[in-house]
Amino acid sequence: MSERAEFIRDSIDFLQRYIIKSLQREAEEFGLTVPQVRVLAEVLTGKRVSIKLLSRNLKMTQSTVSDIVERLTLKGLLVKTPSASDKRSVEISPSSELEGELSENISRIINQSFVDALNLLQPDEQDIVEQGIKLLVNAVKKKIERDGLHKYESFDVFFFRDENESFKSRKKENDK
């Protein structure tokens, strides 16, 4: 079992490195960096987020995120507005340009490397890969809950769907 776990862990690491390299190549076509694409994707998901939340979800320092947000604001992709709840902070939201056509391009940038790889497989092989990933993710979610890790904020960023719900919605219900 240890060899299998090591193989799966190494495979996930390989896939993660592949995603980053592919994302870098795709992002450059739009004049963006990988961290900028990650911030844009997170803002598109949250619609209105703080620098602090972006920092936590993306595992970046607040100063790094702040610099990225500033550059993306100057490019007209993000909008900063004073927070209604905390006058010392700002909320980051997508600009109308980002919410429009560019939103689809960001999604394409993020997914293109896997679309291209999956297209190299036959439809039945694609189904096997999808089923295997679903099994592994569900097993990890069970382990997370069994270990009590679902109570930690770092899992907020995961958004895996079950047939009936997402991990986020279940986490929030558990925290009530």
Image (tube, rainbow, N blue to C red):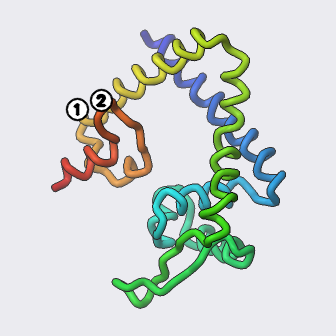
Q: Residue at x 76, y 51 (%)?
A: 27
The image quadrant where one finds the C terminus is bottom left
Work out which residue is located at the far front of the displayed protein and give it: 100
Marks 1 and 2 close (CB-CB < 8 Å): yes
Q: Residue at x 44, y 50 (%)?
A: 157
Q: Is residue 148 left or right of residue 130?
A: left
Q: Is residue 47 left or right of residue 34?
A: left
Inspect the image, locate mark 1, and give the three-letter code of the amino acid beneath it: Arg
Q: Where is residue 60 drawn, in percent x and y?
A: 56, 60
Q: Secondary structure at mark 2?
A: helix
Q: Where is residue 79 drawn, in percent x and y?
A: 59, 77
The image quadrant where one finds the N terminus is top left
Q: Is residue 132 left or right of residue 114?
A: left
Q: Is residue 55 above or below residue 147?
A: below
Q: Is residue 89 above or below residue 166?
A: below
Q: Where is residue 31 drawn, in percent x and y?
A: 82, 60
Inspect the image, locate mark 2, and give the three-letter code of the amino acid beneath it: Lys
Q: Is residue 52 above or below residue 105?
A: below
Q: Residue at x 67, y 30 (%)?
A: 115
Q: Secondary structure at mark 1?
A: helix
Which residue lies under the disc numbered 1? 146
Q: Where is residue 126 drawn, in percent x and y?
A: 58, 16
Q: Residue at x 34, y 41 (%)?
A: 166
Q: Residues within 10 Å of mark 2 (few under 14, many from 20)?
A: few
Which residue lies under the disc numbered 2? 143
Question: How far apart are labels 1 and 2 at the CA level?
Answer: 5 Å
